[in-house]
Image (tube, rainbow, N blue to C red):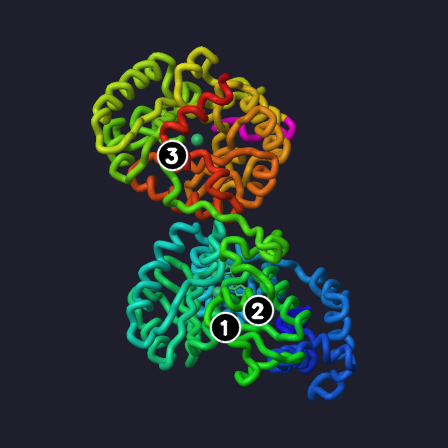
């Protein structure tokens, strides 16, 4: 356990003791100890190992013992017991702006409130204002605080985070005092959801850059502002952090704040193993923690840092400690797919089902985007909420698509609209259209859209049943999850992947940012099994066509190369590939 984590736990113990109404001296001792530890630059682990905790002022015997236990075992029974003795709702309540442990204790003692929901009700019923030490104003502040927490806590979808981040990055780039800048954190790693935005810049005049950042438009409030770092809350609820460093430090700071934490831990250990020290300011020729610039190993880019630790440059998407070190050591990192490798999307909708635009409009937009093909896969008859097509309408649509293709016969480059269906997988794994209808379509995507509540075994069987149909090219959004909104249905994804491997069925990477389904963590397994990926926009309107870029990024995060992705094929080769399973 590192210093920061130990400090955090001591701080929390202080809060818990206050919630219990323990004597203030005891409470304060923990909070002070947390401060002290934050100020120590040496790792606690070495202080403990060399029995040097005694030399630190303000740490009594009891505290020293607890710190030792934490550092050595990563756990502290005293803390676990303390935590278990207090309703979790009370701890949560202390996170509401303006509510400290003392006030939370009073609310609990006087009104029996044990959760944020109960607190909100009590405020709305005007029962809080009457308490000693509260009043109308405090009551209103609590209501606002709860509202704020609800609106501004938690995670954000990847694409909305990028939409917010890009103009900020651009304006930093143009600032005369900025030498280099980048996003970092989960955004640079293209995680499917984002906690907060991180920006890193290098400059000779950091305070100017910080001033510029905290004065930009669209800021709701400034959480923290120092000479070299700042945190702000933006109007859409996202928090954005900026760090400004000297240009010599920039690659190290960028690498550190790109994370992930799990990746960083391995990097730091690799440095130690080579008699070096790595932190957010540099890589140092030192056996102890230091910031001494005279000891810094010269690295002008992240690539230099990786090389100093005997590694190939690891792309940010792969920095999750999921095998990237082994691969980078051997020089076997995959050559990741680029979004410009994609030639079209094989799962898209039109206004024949629940899409917005007509066939002609969809076809033209995809052509203008530079695609070589674009499949129309509207919903099938059982999806009546989505205006699914019955066999008659589907037959008419196939004809209409043929007409549209004639318009593109003399186009400047080969281009084809492919007929298709996103056919519902019914319970038991049956499909919503008979085989002779599916056989007439260029592209068949099979997806589940209703009856999500079956057991894991039933859901798995349904998807495997669909994969076993020789006319089904791919399974669509296999888990049905909606990020930050709805969990995946119960499913054995490995079993489904295995079935796809056996039957030659492809799996979709649905590029809609609410889905990103199948999850990036499973693509390495699918790839090992030889299952191909199809990156689909699942577009229902023009704007969704840009999801291709996000889909490609998530595929990169799943270690996929151009060869692993079907829709990097040329039109001619794709049409051959679409016949593989049918033969
Ligand atoms: P997020 O914001 O929750 O989506 O995820 P991240 O990865 O952007 O996390 P964030 O913003 O808290 O911190 C950015 C990076 O800074 C993180 O990926 C790794 C690094 N970092 C932050 N705290 C620690 C730490 O305590 N130890 C280590 N080794 N790295 C840290
Ligand atoms: Ca972040
Ligand atoms: Ca952050
Ligand atoms: Zn669908």
Q: Can you tell which mark lies on residue 299?
A: 1
Nearest-to-viewer mark from 2 and 3: 2
Q: Can you tell which mark lies on residue 345?
A: 3
Distance in Å between CA atoms under marks 1 and 2:
8 Å
What is the quadrant of residue 227 in the picture? bottom left
Distance in Å between CA atoms under marks 3 and 1:
41 Å
Q: Residue at x 55, y 41 (%)?
A: 523
- 567 w.r.t. 12: above or below: above
The residue carrying mark 2 is: 308
**Spot occupied by residue 416 in the image (x, y as percentages of width and height):** 31, 27
Q: Quadrant of the N terminus?
A: bottom right
- 344 w.r.t. 215: above or below: above
Q: Secondary structure at mark 3?
A: strand
Whether residues under marks 2 and 3 lie with C-beta atoms below 8 angstroms apart, the answer is: no
Q: Is residue 154 visible?
A: no
Whether residues under marks 3 and 1 lie with C-beta atoms below 8 angstroms apart, the answer is: no
Span of residues in magenta: 449-457
Q: Residue at x 45, y 45 (%)?
A: 337
Is residue 55 shown left or right of residue 475?
A: right
Whether residues under marks 1 and 2 lie with C-beta atoms below 8 angstroms apart, the answer is: yes
Mark toward the start of the polypeptide (1 vs 2): 1
Mark toward the start of the polypeptide (2 vs 3): 2
Is residue 479 shown left or right of residue 170?
A: right
Q: Secondary structure at mark 2?
A: helix
Count numbered badges in the picture: 3
Distance in Å between CA atoms under marks 2 and 3:
41 Å
**Spot occupied by residue 182 in the image (x, y as percentages of width and height):** 40, 65
Q: Give the main secondary structure of the magenta stretch.
A: loop
């Amino acid at each position: 356990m590192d210093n920061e984590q130990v400090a955090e736990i001591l701080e929390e113990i202080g809060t818990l003791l206050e919630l219990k109404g323990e004597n203030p001296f005891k409470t304060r001792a923990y909070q002070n100890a947390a401060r002290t530890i934050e100020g120590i630059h040496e790792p606690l682990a070495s202080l403990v190992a060399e029995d040097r905790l005694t030399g630190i002022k303000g740490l009594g015997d009891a505290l020293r013992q607890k710190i030792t236990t934490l550092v050595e075992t990563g756990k502290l029974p005293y803390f676990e017991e303390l935590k278990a003795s207090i309703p979790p709702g009370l701890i949560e309540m202390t996170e509401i702006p303006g509510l400290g442990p003392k006030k939370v204790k009073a609310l609990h003692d006087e009104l029996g409130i044990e959760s944020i929901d109960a607190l909100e009700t009590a405020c709305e019923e005007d029962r809080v204002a009457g308490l000693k030490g509260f009043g109308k104003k405090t009551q209103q502040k609590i209501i606002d605080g709860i509202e704020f927490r609800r609106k501004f806590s938690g995670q954000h979808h990847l694409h909305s985070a990028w939409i917010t981040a890009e103009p900020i990055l651009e304006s930093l780039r143009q600032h005369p005092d900025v030498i280099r800048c980048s996003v970092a954190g989960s955004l640079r790693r293209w995680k499917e959801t984002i906690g907060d935005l991180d920006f890193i810049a290098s400059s000779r005049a950091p305070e100017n850059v910080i001033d510029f950042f905290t004065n930009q438009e669209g800021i709701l409030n400034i959480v923290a502002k120092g000479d070299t770092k700042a945190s702000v809350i933006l109007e859409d609820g996202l928090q954005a952090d900026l760090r400004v460093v000297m240009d010599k430090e920039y690659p190290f700071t960028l690498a550190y704040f790109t994370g992930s934490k799990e990746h960083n831990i391995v990097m730091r250990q690799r440095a130690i193993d080579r008699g070096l020290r790595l932190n957010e300011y540099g890589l140092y020729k030192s056996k102890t923690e230091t910031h001494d610039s005279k000891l810094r190993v010269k690295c002008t880019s992240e690539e230099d840092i990786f090389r100093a630790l005997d590694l190939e440059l690891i792309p940010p998407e792969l920095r999750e400690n999921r095998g990237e070190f082994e691969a980078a050591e051997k020089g076997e990192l995959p050559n990741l797919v680029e979004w410009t490798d994609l030639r079209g999307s094989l799962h898209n909708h039109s206004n024949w089902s629940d899409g917005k635009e007509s066939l002609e409009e969809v076809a033209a937009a995809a052509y203008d985007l530079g695609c070589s093909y674009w499949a129309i896969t509207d919903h099938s008859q059982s999806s009546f909420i989505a205006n699914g097509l019955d066999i008659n309408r589907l037959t008419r649509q196939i004809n209409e698509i043929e007409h549209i293709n004639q318009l593109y016969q003399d186009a400047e480059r080969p281009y084809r609209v492919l007929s298709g269906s996103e056919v519902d997988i019914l319970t038991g794994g049956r499909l919503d259209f008979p085989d002779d209808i599916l056989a007439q379509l260029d592209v068949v995507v099979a997806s589940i859209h209703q009856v999500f509540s079956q057991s894991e075994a039933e859901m798995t069987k349904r998807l495997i049943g669909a994969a076993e149909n020789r006319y089904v090219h791919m399974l669509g959004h296999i888990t049905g999850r909606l990020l930050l909104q709805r969990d995946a249905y119960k499913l054995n994804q490995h079993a489904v992947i295995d079935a796809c491997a056996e039957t030659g069925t492809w799996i979709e990477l649905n590029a809609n940012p609410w889905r990103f389904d199948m999850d990036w963590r499973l693509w390495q397994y699918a790839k090992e099994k030889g299952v191909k990926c199809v990156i689909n926009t699942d577009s229902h309107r023009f704007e969704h066509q840009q999801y291709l870029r996000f889909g490609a990024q998530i595929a990169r995060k799943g270690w996929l190369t151009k060869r692993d992705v079907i829709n990097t094929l040329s039109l001619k080769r794709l049409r051959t590939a679409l016949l593989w399973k049918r033969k």
